Structure formats: structure tokens, C-alpha cells
Amino acid sequence: MEWNELYDAGRKPDMEQIGAYVTNGLWEELCRHLEQEYKTAPKIEYSRCSMQPGWNVKYKKGGRALCTLYPAEGYYTCMVSIGSREAAEAELLLTACTPYVRELYRDAGCLNGSRWLMIDVTDRDILTDVMELIQTRVQRKAG
């Protein structure tokens, strides 16, 4: 059963139910990383977006979106926006990324100065790429 059918707009899942649907340790690993590294909490929201309808999980830091996670059976999609502030760092980082993520970035058109990457997290190498891209979203403190 599709995610948006299993949990419709009137039936909000919790993080445990989402993890049970995804059934992939990479889900828990990214969520734990985001919560510990950035001291942020997940926010479960419903979207009627035609591209990815249903419940998703958003992580923010200091009012700025880090990523949005879209559950799927056996994997999940992580949406990361790379704006003009992060572009130079992200493009340097891409040289070490998987061919899959490099291709997504190359093919993502710019919309309002940002590239919206919808990354299917299916293995550890892609998860590593996602974590590195998310890091570019965090404003660095001068120090």
C-alpha cells in the first residue's frame, strides 16, 4: 500500500510508524544524526503536493530548513535545497559524491536561485552525500 494511502490527511503517523514503514536502518541513522548533530527535532507535516503527497518529516535549524524526508517502502527520499549561499561549497563537495547525486545536481534546474534535490536514500554512500549536503545548509559560526 502506498504511503499516502496508508496514512491519509486525517491519520497522522508518529516517527515509530514512519520508521516501520520505511524499514531501512538508514532512516533511523539520518534522523538520529540530524537530532544529535544539529539539536533539532522532527516535525511531521502533511503535504498535498502532487509530486510527493502525504506525510513527510521536516528538520529545521535556526528557522532554516535542513531537509524534508519523504517515506517510501524500503527507502526514503531526502529533499535538500542548495541555494546561492551554499552553491560554491556544494559544488566542491560534489566531486566526492556518488555519480547518482552528481547527476541529480547537474540535472536539477535552478528555481528562484536554488536547486531542489530529491535524493532517494537507498545505500550508505548516498546517505553520506546527503549528510554532507545538509551540512552546507547550516550557517557556520565565525570562530
Image: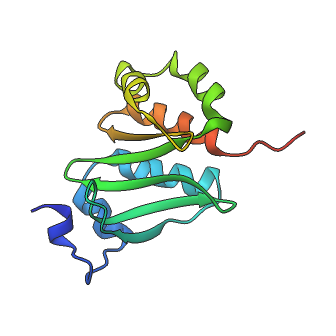
Within the image, what quadrant is residue 22 found in?
bottom left
Q: Is residue 53 left or right of residue 118?
A: left
Residue at (63%, 50%) from the top-left corner?
37
Answer with the quarter of the image where residue 55 lies: bottom left
Q: Is residue 51 above or below residue 57?
A: above
The type of colouring in the image is rainbow
**Front residue of 39 and 107:** 107
Q: Is residue 94 left or right of residue 51?
A: right
What quarter of the picture does the C terminus occupy?
A: top right
Nearer to us in this view, 124 or 108 = 108
Outermost residue toward the left in this view: 1
Q: In the rendered image, which quarter is residue 49 located in? A: bottom left
- Residue at screen point 59% across, 40% down: 83
Q: Residue furthest right?
A: 143
In the image, residue 141 above or below residue 41: above
Whole-percent x, y for residue 107 in the image: 37, 27
Q: Residue furthest bottom?
A: 10
In the image, farthest residue toward the front: 112
Q: How many marks?
A: 0
Residue at 9% over, 62% down: 1
Q: Position of residue 119 (x, y in %)?
A: 36, 39
Residue 113, position as x, y percentages in the image: 57, 39
Q: Is residue 44 above or below residue 96?
A: below
In the image, is residue 91 above or below residue 69?
Answer: above
Q: Is residue 43 left or right of residue 113?
A: left
Q: Residue 123 at what x, y percent from top left?
A: 32, 33
